[in-house]
Image (tube, helix red, strand yellow):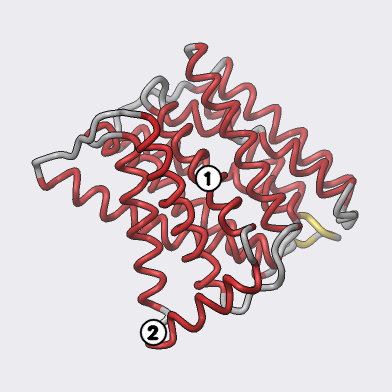
Amino acid sequence: MTPLALLYIIGTIFMASLWRILVKTKTKPTVHDLSFAALIDGSAALVTILIFLCSGTSFTIPTHYLPWIGLGVSIVLSTIGDCLILVSSKYADVADTSILLPLSNLWIALIAVFALGENVTPFRWVAIGCIVVGSMITLAKTGKILLNKGIIAVLVYGIVNAIMVNIDKGVSPNFSLYVYVIIAYGTSSSIMSLLLGRHAKQTLTSEWKRQGWWLVVIGATWSLFSIMILSAYKLSDVSTVIPFMRLFIVITTAYSLIFLKERGRMWQKIIGSIVVTVGAILLAYVG
């Protein structure tokens, strides 16, 4: 992994942590989850446009139709993923959702091997096993597996995200980086707004008045997150970038326990986060 790729990944760790903390602590209960997601994605698109205009970079789009099809599939998956991650933030502890997100590494590794032809070593599979075990420790509760609407949402998100990041890895180099992010977030926001139906304007306005400018702040963190992670994809394998980025669970788990007082299954969360973090470090450095 190059120093520049490492820098980008450190940025994504910070942005992913900040995103989850802001959603959990700085926004009020939503009027409608879909309108909330649409406004955040719209804000992310607008912030990215501003960054693009200030960057002075070139505008590049592919002339062949295949990259556009890939982008379209990625946008649909991103739209579904944004809704799922907001539901998980709303109904599950920050620590739980953060620790469970790395489960997507299993699907990412499988797709990276069979779709992108990347090499995943036996040691990397062992590291992924640590992530799976740590996640299961977190979910265990008196001999049963803890499941609620938020946890189910984040588990499904892991599969959706695994497919999406591999598509992004293969398709995004055909576009200017900022253009890719702008199209993805702008289209996702438009799709969710249309799904709100004929009362979309009223619903979006109501949500905006309720949440205020925090929506823009959250959208900005998501924009920067996407820019950094897509930049990292150009410098390293998906199956290395994503596991290393998952180190944000350390930050969010600590924040959840200390500041949000989410003390249920505290030791399971701590042990689970440690095991997951060890797996992520092994995956990024040695695997």
Q: Which residue is mark 2?
A: 197
Can you identify the residue that label 1 sits on?
Answer: 104
Measuring from the top left, give residue 37's x and y in whole percent.
51, 64
| Residue 123 horizontal/vertical position (percent) | 55, 21
Residue occupying image coordinates x 57% and y 24%: 283
Neighbourhood count class around disc 2 (C-alpha, 10 Å): few under 14, some 14–19, many 20 upward: few
* Picture residue at 9% right of the left edge, 41% below the top: 63
Secondary element under disc 1, as helix, strand or loop, is helix
10 Å neighbourhood of mark 1: few (<14), some, or many (≥20)?
many
Three-letter residue code for mark 1: Ser
Q: Secondary structure at mark 2?
A: helix
Q: Residue furthest left?
A: 64
| Residue 259 shown left or right of residue 159 in the figure | right
Q: Which three-letter amino acid code belongs to the residue tagged 2?
A: Gly
| Quadrant hosting residue 59 | top left
* Residue nearest the viewer, comparing 114 with 216: 216
Marks 2 and 1, the one that precedes in the sequence: 1
Please give the name of the residue rendered at 52% of the width and 25% of the height, measured from the top-left corner. Answer: 8
Q: Look at 26% across and 39% down and name the residue there.
A: 171
Q: Which image quadrant is residue 173 in?
A: top left
The residue at the far front in this view is: 54
Circles 2 and 1: CB distance less than 8 Å? no
